[in-house]
Amino acid sequence: VNFASDNTAGVPPEMIQALIDANHGFVLGYGNDDWTRRLDDRMNALFGRDVATFLVPTGTAANALALAHITPPWGGVICHQSAHIMTDECGAPEFFGGGIKLIGFPGDDGKLSLATLKQAISQYSARRPHQVNAAALSLTQASESGTIYRPAEIAALCETAHAAGLKVHMDGARFGNALSRLNASAADLTWKAGVDVLSFGATKGGAMAAEAIVFFDPKLAEWMPERRKRGGQLLSKHRFIAAQFEAYLEQDRWLAWARHANQMADRLARRLGEAGIEVVWPVEANLVFAIFPKEIDARLKAAGAAYYARRPSMLPPGVKLPAEAVLARMVTSFATTPEEIERFGDLIQKR
Ligand SMILES: Cc1ncc(COP(=O)(O)O)c(C=O)c1O
């Protein structure tokens, strides 16, 4: 049973087939190929407007290049304190952004509230030239706590951000998990709510290595081709990254795979609840956080189950981690099976 991350899963056969199908003949590099052209059209159709799409191989590159593009080197990016850009990208946004400053704030359920954003903006919009000024807001969808921003929440945050001159970035490493849970379109969750640029992840959803930076106003993407190239993120055999994204979007596979992952997370949360285990945040995507007594943690680990322990400081205020317990994060994927969930549940209940 492996719930360490959604990237521990392999790649669905449809994705491998798309790579095999793309693997013949001689094709120009750097995006001058039919796969990339078709994907551009498909992205326009998915979002219901002309967008500017840039494919990169990692989510870190997508976030870092997108943030670097919308934030001047002396600007600040407001984000949640648990945001992947803050905690897990080894300073890539700061590096690609020439020294931009990420400013993390707390927020219930892994999300930033409107009140926090307003306070953050007022704290970081004065004292020029001595202090970094807020230039961008970054939201993670689904969040690092496995929760989802609703379109109305995004719209309110974007309105406040834009009124203060900030641009809005969305880290959509798990965009499919968020979208497949809501009765909304990809447009509702992004530009219609005010998002300026999306890191649209496919890797966690099933691709081998495919992420897209999507600008909803192509004018904002001016000089992005150079930024991606200069950052070493323009693949020469570009057809293979476009072919992956094409296969991901075709027949709405990405949504079906994400829906499956979400359903497996629901099932896991139910099973944990039945076993008397406390689940920490509402399970809205494919992440489940739970407090495991140490002996259960040891039993699961001894049986070969994989998941990560998270920092107790991630816990919401008022929830205290007992001394003999761990905060465990379980991540499901397109490849998770009901049998794995049952095995995991049985191990927990074997008292
Ligand atoms: C929320 C979020 N954003 C971005 C990423 C970036 O992924 P990568 O490992 O491809 O750089 C991850 C991966 O864990 C993530 O969880």
Image (cartoon, rainbow, N blue to C red):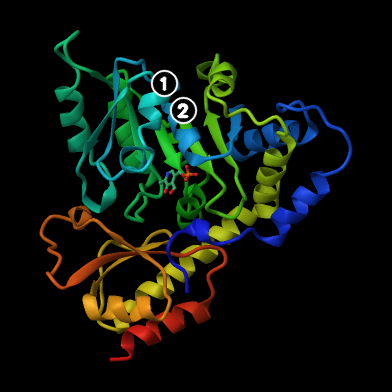
Whether the residues at callouts 1 and 2 have beta carbons within 8 Å, the answer is: yes
Q: Residue at x 37, y 20 (%)?
A: 71
- Quadrant containing the C terminus is bottom left
Q: Is residue 296 left or right of residue 217?
A: left
Which residue has dot 1 on it?
70
Which residue has dot 2 on it?
66
Q: Residue 49: in sight, yes or no? A: no
| Vertical side of 280 occupied by 50: above or below | above
Percent from the top left, x then y, of residue 118?
19, 30
The residue closer to the viewer here, 18 or 43, is 18
Using the rendered view, name the quadrant where residue 25 is placed.
Answer: top right
Distance from disc 1 to disc 2, alpha carbons, whole Å, reads 7 Å
Q: Residue 257: in sight, yes or no? A: yes
- Amino acid type for the residue under numbered disc 1: Ile
Q: Secondary structure at mark 1?
A: helix
Percent from the top left, x then y, of residue 303?
41, 81
